[in-house]
Structures are given as structure tokens and as C-alpha cells.
């Protein structure tokens, strides 16, 4: 009995929200009229709401970068630890074998 559920593929355009439930994640700036609108649904946005959304995304991105830096430092530490272990194993393998005192 299989517990695998089929999922349909979505393109990035199909995954975007449209209409009243649009999150307005893709903004368009019109330099000539000084307006901000949503690229997905076309709704007019206030500059403050667009700037607020960008500031929130910037903060989330900075947090993600910090988490990735921590993961990278842990990975570097683990690589160094494993490298030392492999060097120790290699040194033991290359050491001349001592004859057994029983022979």
C-alpha cells in the first residue's frame, strides 16, 4: 500500500496569487507618474506599504543569511574534524608494522 500523493506541477506564474487574495509580492514602480502597483494583480499600492513589505523581506533575508553563516561555520568545523580523523587513520596505515613478539 503506497502513501505517495500525486502533486501537479505549477509554473512560477501559476503559483502567484491573483485577485483579492493577492499578497502583492511583485511590485512595479512607474518613474514617470511616481506610482507603485502590483505586477500580478495591477492594484495600486501606497509607497509606504510597498516600502514596508520590502523592509520586512529585507529583515527576513538578513536573518536567513545569518542562519546560513552559522551552518557554514558548523560545516567548516565538521570538515576540519573529519580531515584530522582521516589524517590520523592515514598516519596509522603508513606506520611500519612491528613484528609480533609471539613469532
Image (tube, rainbow, N blue to C red):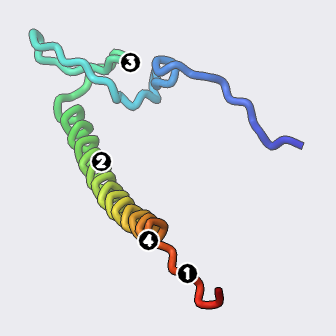
Residue 90 spot, x, y in % from top left = 44, 64
Q: Give the class, few, some or many, for how many residues have Cα within 10 Å of label 1's Cα (few <14, many ≥20).
A: few
Q: Give the class, few, some or many, for how many residues have Cα within 10 Å of label 2's Cα (few <14, many ≥20).
A: few
Q: CA distance from mark 4 to mark 1?
A: 12 Å
Closer to the camera in the image, 57 or 7: 7
Closer to the camera in the image, 38 or 91: 91
Which residue is most to the top? 32
The local secondary structure at tag 4 comes to loop
Name the quadrant of the C terminus: bottom right
Q: Residue at x 39, y 18 (%)?
A: 41
Q: Is residue 12 above or below residue 66?
A: above
**Which residue is tagged 3?**
40
Q: CA distance from mark 2 to mark 4?
A: 53 Å
Q: CA distance from mark 2 to mark 1?
A: 63 Å
Q: Give the class, few, some or many, for how many residues have Cα within 10 Å of label 3's Cα (few <14, many ≥20).
A: some
Q: Which mark is residue 13?
A: none
Q: Is residue 99 above or below residue 88?
A: below
Q: Quadrant of residue 37?
A: top left
**Which residue is tagged 1?**
99
Does residue 22 appear left or right of residue 63 in this picture?
Answer: right
Q: Is residue 37 above or below residue 92?
A: above
Residue 78 spot, x, y in % from top left = 39, 63
The mark nearer the N terminus, 2 or 1, is 2
Q: Which mark is residue 60?
A: 2
Q: Nearer the viewer, mark 2 or mark 1?
A: 1
**Which residue is tagged 4?**
95
Q: Residue at x 39, y 31 (%)?
A: 23
Amino acid at each position: 500500500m503506497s502513501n505517495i500523493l500525486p502533486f501537479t506541477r505549477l509554473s512560477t506564474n501559476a503559483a502567484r496569487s491573483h485577485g483579492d487574495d493577492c499578497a502583492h509580492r511583485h511590485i512595479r514602480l512607474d518613474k514617470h507618474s511616481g506610482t507603485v502597483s502590483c505586477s500580478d494583480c495591477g492594484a495600486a499600492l501606497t509607497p509606504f506599504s510597498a516600502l514596508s513589505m520590502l523592509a520586512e523581506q529585507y529583515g527576513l533575508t538578513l536573518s536567513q543569511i545569518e542562519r546560513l553563516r552559522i551552518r557554514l561555520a558548523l560545516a567548516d568545523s565538521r570538515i576540519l574534524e573529519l580531515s584530522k580523523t582521516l589524517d590520523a587513520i592515514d598516519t596509522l596505515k603508513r606506520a611500519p608494522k612491528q613484528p609480533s613478539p609471539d613469532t
